[in-house]
Amino acid sequence: MASLDPRIRRAEPELWHIPPLPLEPLGHWQTYEVFILRTRGSHAQHVGSLHAPDAEMALILAKEQYARRSQCVALWVVPTDSILWTSPEDEDLFLPATDKTYREPQGYLHTRERLNKYRDRLKPSAS
């Protein structure tokens, strides 16, 4: 049986294709991803995940969990289901256009085809 814990699902790629089991409404808290800015001008760094009933409580819990003992100038707390990502199968989205077809309007058709293929893969299959 696949784990309901999103941390385990992220850590084990072989579980990515298994859809999460349905949960009862209000049966669990929402999962949030926490990003920290250690110094001004530095890059944000993902430091972990947490469960909270709402965004305000998630920010409080993130401060206590991830910024209490280390230097921090800012925290970002984002609902996990709001994050979009690409998988290694989508690597052709990042290939450079070496033939410079992007200078012509028809050059974007190939890019559109690649984006449509990516979107189709994101849609849940109707079974």
Image (spheres, grey):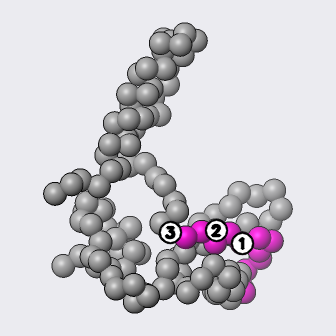
User: Where residue 37 appears, x then y in whole percent?
Assistant: 73, 66
Q: Would residue 52 be found to the left or right of residue 7 on screen?
A: right
Q: Quadrant of the N terminus?
A: bottom left
The quadrant in which residue 32 appears is bottom right
Up/down of 83 relative to 20, above or below:
above
**Of marks 3 and 1, which one's residue comes earlier in the chain?**
1
Q: Which residue is mark 2?
A: 35
Along the viewing direction, whichever of 30 and 15 lies nearer the viewer: 30
Whether residue 73 appears in magenta in the rendering, the answer is: yes
Judged by depth in the image, the label closer to the viewer, 3 or 2, is 3
Dot 1 lies on which element?
Answer: strand
Q: Which residue is mark 1?
A: 75
Q: Which residue is mark 3?
A: 80
Judged by depth in the image, the label closer to the viewer, 3 or 1, is 3
Up/down of 114 relative to 52, above or below:
above
Residue at left 80%, top 71%?
73
Q: Quadrant of the C terminus?
A: bottom left
Magenta region? 68-79
Residue at left 42%, top 35%?
115
Residue type at mark 1? Leu
Residue type at mark 2? Phe
Residue at left 53%, top 81%?
50
Whether residue 71 appears in magenta in the rendering, the answer is: yes
